[in-house]
Amino acid sequence: MTVQTSSAVALRDPWAVVPSLGNLDAYISAVNRLPMLSPDEESSLARQWRDGGDVQAAGRMVLSHLRLVVSVSRQYLGYGLPHGDLIQEGNVGLMKAVKRFDPDQGVRLVSYALHWVKAEIHEYILRNWRLVKVATTKAQRKLFFNLRSMKQSLKSEAADGQTHRNTLTPAEVDRVATQLNVKAEEVVEMEARLSGGDVGLEPQSDDGEETFAPIAYLADDSGEPTQVLQARHRDQLVSHGIGAALDTLDARSRRIVEQRWLAVNDDASGGMTLHELAAEYGISAERVRQIEVAALKKMRKALEAAA
């Protein structure tokens, strides 16, 4: 029985020697044992892929640089995302680099692929670090990754015995803005995005304090059909219903109601008092009150009938 070495298997099927990312330790151990390509080998394989579309040659170039992706991905473990996912996204960037690599440019694949690997990992972090994307423009992305590392270095440089601070001082903001060639306001805004968190609109559970979520006070009921109909009916009663109800009264009862409830004088003192109306009609104040009560009851019945 012939025992095939990993190199022989790699020549025939480059992917057979790499275990699944499900076992991360085994994967990292395997890619670190894969042989590196010499400049001549790399150039020859790159030409085979570019000129003849040799997939096996492209696969060998990818295999020999998987350790690069593992090394780069370790730099981004502080974002709280799975290491396996970072490696997987970096491998996508590596394959894009191999696809576009030109051996006649005079650079090694490792230098060319580094940009693609980092770019793919950066994109993955920005998509998944928060529910809401924290950086959209190229300048914001650069500030996002640089600000995080610079804050760590500023903390390590501080040796004045002060209490731990999570935010930058105005002097530190100016220093970061100068080094990154951005405005201080942009540094402050990005720092606020980094220190903030996502808040779910919907409650996370059915009991407890978390049941009161932003959706409770952000919801707009103005377009809800029942609310619209009720508001329309209320406006109709205010504009036309009261006028129709007043028309059901005799002249004396109508004047009493208008003076007691609807009149507004220039001095905002309201209409006439019971005694003033009693003097006008030559009756007692109690009689005026009785007429007022009866008139309001009659108007209420008219409004209910109109509803």
Image: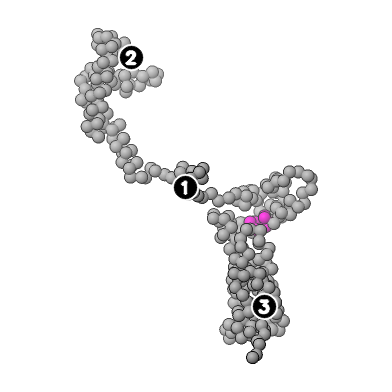
**Does the residue at mark 1 contact the one at mark 2 (Cβ under 8 Å)?**
no
Q: Give above or below for 272 relative to 302.
A: above
Residue type at mark 3 is: Ser
The residue under the point 67% across, 77% down is 64
Spot occupied by residue 102 in the image (x, y as percentages of width and height): 64, 79
User: What kind of element bears circle 1?
Assistant: loop
**Residue 296: x and y, percent?**
26, 23
Q: What is the quadrant of the N terminus in the image?
A: bottom right
Give the label on residue 163, or none.
none
The verdict on residue 145 being magenta is yes
Residue at the limit of the structure toward the front, as seen here: 1
Residues drawn in magenta = 143-148
Kindly identify which numbered label has been placed on residue 273. 2
**Distance from Cα at disc 1 to Cα at disc 2:** 56 Å
Of marks 1 and 2, the one in the foreground:
1
Q: Position of residue 74 (x, y in %)?
A: 68, 64
- In the image, taking residue 295 as reference, residue 141 lies left or right, namely right
Q: Which residue position is annotated with label 3?
A: 64
Question: How far separated are the C-alphas under marks 1 and 3?
Answer: 52 Å
Query: Can you see residue 106?
Result: no
